[in-house]
Image (cartoon, rainbow, N blue to C red):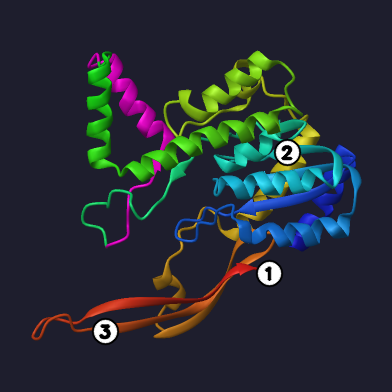
Amino acid sequence: MLADRLDLYKQLQEKRKSQILVYVTGDRRGLETNIASDVYDSFVNQLDKIGPVPKISLYLYTRGGDTLSAWSIINLIKQFADEVEVIVPSKCHSAGTLMSLGAKKIIMTKQATLGPIDPSVNNPLNPQIPGAPPGVNFPISVEAIEGYIQLMKEECEFTKEHDTNKLMELLSQNIHPIVLGQVYRAKAQIKILSRRLLIDQVNDEKKIEKIIDFLCSSSGSHDYTIHRREARDELGLNIETPDQDLYNIIKGIYDSIENELELTTVYDPNQILGDNQTKTYSLKRALIESISEGVLSRQNIQIQPGMMAQQVINDQRTLEGWR
C-alpha cells in the first residue's frame, strides 16, 4: 500500500537527489492497462505540485501503449526538470522503452527489460481474426510487414521491378492499402520521435542510428526483451547499474506495487462473486491511482429450448479511468 511505500520513496529520493514520480500501468491478466492519453492531465496536476526542480526520477513499469501518449508524457516531465532519469524495476516495454529514450540515463535492475518500439496499427480495415466477433481484427505491426518483404526478397529472390510490383500486389490483396500506408507512416514517425528523444542520452550519430534501427525493425519480434547488458554494451544506451542499497529500495517499491495491484494473480470474476448473484467490486489497475469499479452479476441463460441453461457472468464496469 501507498503508506508502506512512502518511506521507500523518501529513501529513493535521497539516494538519487531528485524528486520521485511513479507511473505503473498494471499487466494483471484480465485487467491490463496501457499508456494512454487519459493520464496526461493527472501528470500535469502531479507535476504542478512538484514544480520545476533540478532532477526528476521516473519510476516506470509498463508493457506499453500509445506511442504519441508516451511521447507527450516524457516531454511533459522534461519541462519540469533540468534532468530526467528513468528507473526500470522490471518491465518497460514498447511505448515505455520510447519514454526511457528521452531520459538522461536509465537505471535498470538485473531483472529489468526494455523492448522494441515498432508500433502496431489497429484500424477497422485490418484483416479480421477468423472466428472472432465482427470488429476484432489483427493488429498489423511494422515488423510483420518488413518481415514479409524481407522473406520475399531474400528467400524467394524477388528482385526485379515486376517482381516487386507483384510482391506489393500480393500484400495489398490481404491488407488494405490504407492500412499499409498507416504502417509506413507509423514506422517513419517512431524513428523521428526516438531520434529526438535520444539526443539527451546519446551524442554519437552512429550509435543513435544503431539504436533506432534495432528498436524499430531489426530486433525480429515485438516480444524481444532487452536486458541491462545488451542495452548498455550492445546498443550503447546510457545504463546505470544500481548498487545493492539502491536495488533493495527499487525492489521494495516494486514488491509493494506488485502486491497492491495483484499483478501475478489472474482476475477471476467467479472468485470475486463467490456464491453471490451480484457483487460490486473495486480493483486498482495502475498508479497514478487508477481504479476499476463495477458490478458483477451471474445469470442463467437458456440458449435453446430443452437444453440445460448456461451460467453467464456480466461484468458491468462503471469506471475505467483515472482518479
Between marks 3 and 2 in the image, the one whose residue lies nearer the viewer: 2
- Marks 3/2: CA distance? 50 Å
141 is within the stretch colored magenta: yes
On the image, the x and y values in percent for residue 4 come to 76, 59
On the image, the x and y values in percent for residue 160 come to 26, 13
Q: Residues within 10 Å of mark 1 (few under 14, many from 20)?
A: few
Residue on which disc 1 sits: 323
Residue drawn where x is 47% and y is 23% of the image: 218
Residue on which disc 2 sits: 86
Of marks 3 and 1, which one's residue comes earlier in the chain? Answer: 3
SS at badge 2: strand
Residue drawn where x is 61% and y is 32% of the image: 192
Quarter of the image with the N terminus in it: bottom right
Residue drawn where x is 30% and y is 77% of the image: 312
Residue drawn where x is 90% and y is 40% of the image: 17
Q: Any mark on residue 300, and which?
A: 3
Left or right: residue 258 compared with residue 15: left
- Which amino acid lies under the numbered mark 3 shown in the image of this protein? Asn
- Marks 3/1: CA distance? 35 Å
